[in-house]
Image (tube, rainbow, N blue to C red):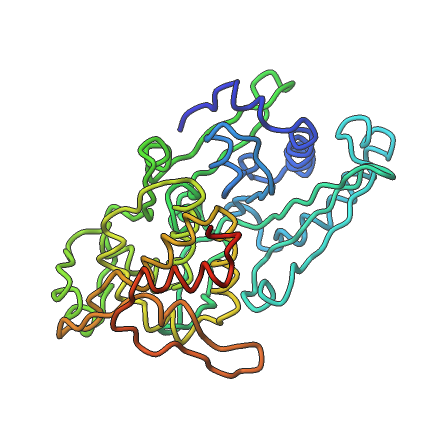
Amino acid sequence: ERQLPARLVSKVPHAEVRLLRFFIDYLAWRKLPVDGVLVNGGYVRDLLLDTVPDDLDLSLCLVDCPEHVTVEWILADLDNFRASLGPGLTQATYGFSDLRRVDIQGDMTKNKQLDTAKAVFQYGEGQPHIEVDIMPTIGEETYEDEGHRIPTRDQRGTPQQDALRRDLTIGAMLLRVTTDPSGEGLTWTLLDYYNGLGDLRDKVLRAPFPAELPPHMLTESELELAEAVGLDISSPQQVWWVKVLRDDPLRILRVFRFAAKLDFQICPTFWRVICFCLDSLKSKVAGSRKMTEVLKLCKYGKVRVIDMFNLCFRKRFVYRADGALTCLAPAIFGGVDGKGFVHYLPTVLSINKDWFLAIAKDAIPDALG
């Protein structure tokens, strides 16, 4: 734990500081055993990169709360807190004029059976609103089988358990915001369980991993593949990243996207473990979700796009215990469409880079010229 420097605290927009104070004051008013509010995800990463953050996502650690206390219950109870203050004092103290809550964020959230909600804070006519996503700290996640992307979640996890389930250390840091000893200001404490700050400084993308591995992390077939690719099965870092990508193969594309966005290097372990989930990425992840990640990456310029295509078509990976090689393209470009039809690229054996770029330039000369 370490305190966030004042110069970085100053990057947090004033309206969001007041909203954090609103949640902290509510917890004190209701006398809930919750140690402040946790800011998570890309918000913390961007703040530490000295940029103005956006997309405020909050977590609440409900481990010590009564069973009936959930995020949904808390969001409903905020109305009682506001009523105890009165509308005039609420707006004068916290800035917003109205609060609307959305209990379920969409079909994906509903399918995952998450105790999560969105709070929409209104600031009067003509003023932009602020949306805040809130969820509990998640503990252990259990997937029923390979390729089943909706896990069973322990929604009474600790902050450290919640951080471990993230795909990258730079997104696994939490910022705990509490009332300072004077009761007037706020204390900002960085919780960095997996060296995310060090990876930010080193400009490297790496998955968080526990100090010790649970037993039987790899199946028999995965052990054979591990031997073929030279994976150290005694290394928590290497084996845990197999789990990270196996649990959600789309994380492969997220790693590529963040490498393009931040100009970070990818930890060498990634290239060794990527083979464990290529089949699942190809057949279990919808083509539309993969294309969304690809299009996000395209926003970072033509050089990044060309680098991605070179990587997808030219780099070879061992993907079977017998040493057979493949590339990423068939797993990334294709999948199940919205009508349930499957569209895959055939296995790509080779690609002529100059030929490919010539065709691309004729098709979109302004983009590649």
Expressed as whole percent of the image width and height from the top left, the position of residue 336 reads: 49, 77
Toward which corner of the image does residue 26 lie, by quadrant? top right
Q: Is residue 227 left or right of residue 311?
A: left
Q: Residue at x 32, y 65 (%)?
A: 328
Q: Residue at x 23, y 63 (%)?
A: 316
Q: Is residue 67 above or below residue 13?
A: below
Furthest residue in direction top, as rendered: 182
Toward which corner of the image does residue 34 lie, by quadrant? top right
Position of the N terminus, as image quadrant, is: top left
Expressed as whole percent of the image width and height from the top left, the position of residue 110 reads: 61, 66
Q: Is residue 183 above or below residue 153?
A: above
Toward which corner of the image does residue 140 lie, by quadrant? bottom left
Q: Is residue 94 above or below residue 59?
A: above
Q: Residue at x 38, y 48 (%)?
A: 164
Expressed as whole percent of the image width and height from the top left, the position of residue 178 reads: 56, 29
Q: Residue at x 69, y 57 (%)?
A: 103
Q: Is residue 211 left or right of residue 333?
A: left
Front residue of this view, candidates 344 and 108:
344
Front residue of this view, candidates 167 and 100:
167
Expressed as whole percent of the image width and height from the top left, the position of residue 107 reads: 62, 67
Q: Say how many tags the image has.
A: 0
